[in-house]
Amino acid sequence: MIGTVVLLMCAIHPLLSYPLSLRAFVRPRPLMIDQASRRPSLAICMSAYNEESVIAAKVERLLEIAAAYGPATIHVYADAPADGTVAILNRYADRIDLVVGAERAGKTAGMNLLVNRSRSDYLLFTDANVESDANAAIELAAALRDPSVGCASAKLIYSNSSETATSSLGSIYWRTEEWIKRIESDRMGLIGCDGAMFLMRRSLHVPPPPHLIDDLYLSLSILVAGSRIVSLDHVLVYERSATGATEEKRRKQRIACQALNVHRAMWPRLRRMPLVLLYGYVSHRLMKWLMPFFLAGAALCALLAVGFALGAAVAGALAAAVGVMLVLGEVTRLRPFSLLSSAALSLTGVATGFLESIFFNETYATWDPAYSVRDTPPAAAAPGHVLAERERG
């Protein structure tokens, strides 16, 4: 049973004991935010694939963000879409810097190209699948008035938490992530940020290799350079979570694989970070990617303990009962079985992505986003939050 307890503690550490341990760390000095000062120039960069149903609304919002901010330009890379995305983007060719790829190169390659085409002090990166307020860039840029801050990230909220067991589970998980990020931001700075929307200093931009995911690579590069990354709870962005368990499994598989690829490429530099940041990275990132293996090991140890104590028949019956519950959840979609099966598939995706990175050198430089995240009308996207139009990409 000792092995089971140790492995379970390792599994829950990234989500519970790690953020609680951060309470013991010294709180950094408050941000020196001055919104009245002159705003540095800003380049807003976005990559898009097959987004014909939403790209017009997204560009309209980017135009509003740029107009509200002031000295801002908009740069969009179309990654060789197969639908009408380019035709729609061409309507805005006089107001945005549009680059259309002849063949698919991936988001990171596109973002690198856009950065090279711009000449701004700050860079704002956003995904086409997020909704935001028009003042988002103003709020994020204000945090960089503190010279110790190299990057500011918005708070992401999943807008369809009540749709299915899978989206509900994804929303619960992400709320936990945002809670952890809030503590990290307050104590020592974020250990990496997601690509929904973040703003950084151009001077800290290190072009990621095209086969690596840009948001994690860039944010970890900022940490290695000695600058802080902060999360701003009052800057909210919204996106839909995948509603199907199989879709979510594939998404987790891709993300885990991409994350491990970044880890392998950057570990020689990451391991030289200050001890507190290294502790945060290992706890919040590396151990989280290992969670499926910790849980599988704990389950195996528990079954062996039951087998030794009560016999192989009892252990076998217990394993069979868990298997039946997983099948019921997947087939019937009845809660709580569906929550259990969704969690199992999600963890399987993380484990598969981890193994793909280690043993098969998979990159996912290009991919097709989950269909279900594009299949909801604007009114249902962000309850209680007024937005001009639906933006999903």
Image (tube, helix red, strand yellow):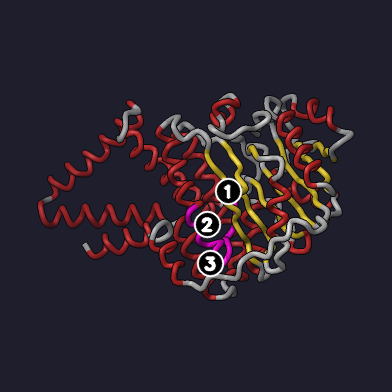
| Residue contact between numbered discs 2 and 1, judged by CB atoms under 8 Å | yes
In-image side of 123 versus 194 (left or right): right
From the viewer's side, name the closer residue of 252 and 143: 143
23 is higher (above) or lower (below) than 82: below
The residue depicted at 60 percent of the width and 35 percent of the height is 369
For the residues labelled 1 and 3, the Cα–Cα distance comes to: 17 Å
The percent coordinates of residue 360 (x first, y second) are 54, 51
Mark sitting earlier along the chain (1/3): 1
* Amino acid bearing label 3: Arg
Q: Which residue lies furthest to the left in this view?
A: 310
Quarter of the picture containing the N terminus is bottom left
Q: Mark 3 points at which residue?
A: 187
The residue depicted at 42 percent of the width and 67 percent of the height is 21
Q: Residue furthest right?
A: 94
Q: What element carries label 1?
A: strand
Q: Which residue lies furthest to the front in this view?
A: 36
266 is higher (above) or lower (below) than 307: below
Q: Name the residue under label 2.
A: 181
149 is higher (above) or lower (below) than 251: below
Mark sitting earlier along the chain (2/1): 1
Quarter of the picture containing the C terminus is top right
The residue depicted at 64 percent of the width and 59 percent of the height is 219
Q: What stretch is highlighted in magenta?
A: 179-194
The residue depicted at 59 percent of the width and 39 percent of the height is 238
Q: Name the residue under label 1.
A: 155
- Residue 188 among those drawn in magenta: yes
Q: Is mark 2 on a helix, strand or loop?
A: helix
* Amino acid bearing label 1: Lys
